[in-house]
Amino acid sequence: MTTESEADTLELPPVPEFGAGRPRWAAQRIHPRRLARGHLAQWARARAWVVAAEHPTPGKARTRRAAGLAAAALLAWRTGHQQPQLLAIAAGAYTLTAWRAGRPVPPTPPTEEELQRRVILGVQQLLEDKPAVFVCDVYAALRARPAAAHLDDARIRAVLLHCGITIHKRVRVSPTQTGRSGIKAADIAALLSPTPVDPPSDDVDAGQGVPEGAVDRP
């Protein structure tokens, strides 16, 4: 687990445009990218502050802020001529703030609804143009993925039921393939449709309600 002090040192993985090299130099190659990203972020914040778009009286606020920036620029110019070492300190401080502003932001984890939709879309890909797919084929396809390789049939079935997918006792995949339990394309289309549809009227093998904590996220 990463501590707060270590969060500032996290880096993105090496990118192709920086070329190949030793792994220990990978972080050094992406330092300019982080500084550039932090500089752009700070520049955008400074511009938004000067423009004062959300201020009740933006016209007056822009005039006052522009005057303040002009006075600060004049003071910095005079100070730079009299004490050049202060410019080096200011440049170092700006580089540090740009470094912190350019810190990589971890991606937002998907919600449970998004994960359920991914499972439903995966079953839809298995259906292709067929009216149904056998549930045993769904088990094999899901278990072939690294995220579900450790799940047995019972847990994958619980995941499908948790996503609202109806498992019928007998489905017809083709004129020569029928008689086994499976998932119908109409049910998957209904789950992906924004409009509610009536539940199926034939026999289903959905089982009892899934108990709390019995389903792993796909």
Image: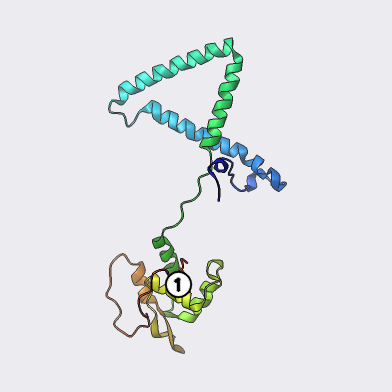
How many residues crowd around disc 1 within 10 Å: few (fewer than 14), some, or many (20 or more)?
many
In percent of width and height, residue 82 lies at: 58, 9
In percent of width and height, residue 75 lies at: 49, 13
Visible in this render: residue 151? yes
Question: Is residue 134 toward the left or the right of residue 90 in the image?
Answer: left
Q: Amino acid at mark 1?
A: Val
| Location of mark 1 (residue) | 123
Q: Does 118 sit above or below residue 132?
A: above
Question: Count of labels shown?
Answer: 1
In percent of width and height, residue 60 lies at: 31, 21
Look at the numbered disc 1 and give the secondary structure of its residue. helix
Q: Which residue sits at x=28%, y=28%?
A: 56
Q: Which residue sits at x=55%, y=26%?
A: 93
Q: Which residue sits at x=29%, y=82%?
A: 201
Task: Give the image's coloring scheme.
Answer: rainbow
Question: Is residue 95 toward the left or the right of residue 28 in the image?
Answer: left
Q: Report which quarter residue 196 is drawn in.
A: bottom left
Q: Does 202 sit above or below residue 108?
A: below
Visible in this render: residue 20? no
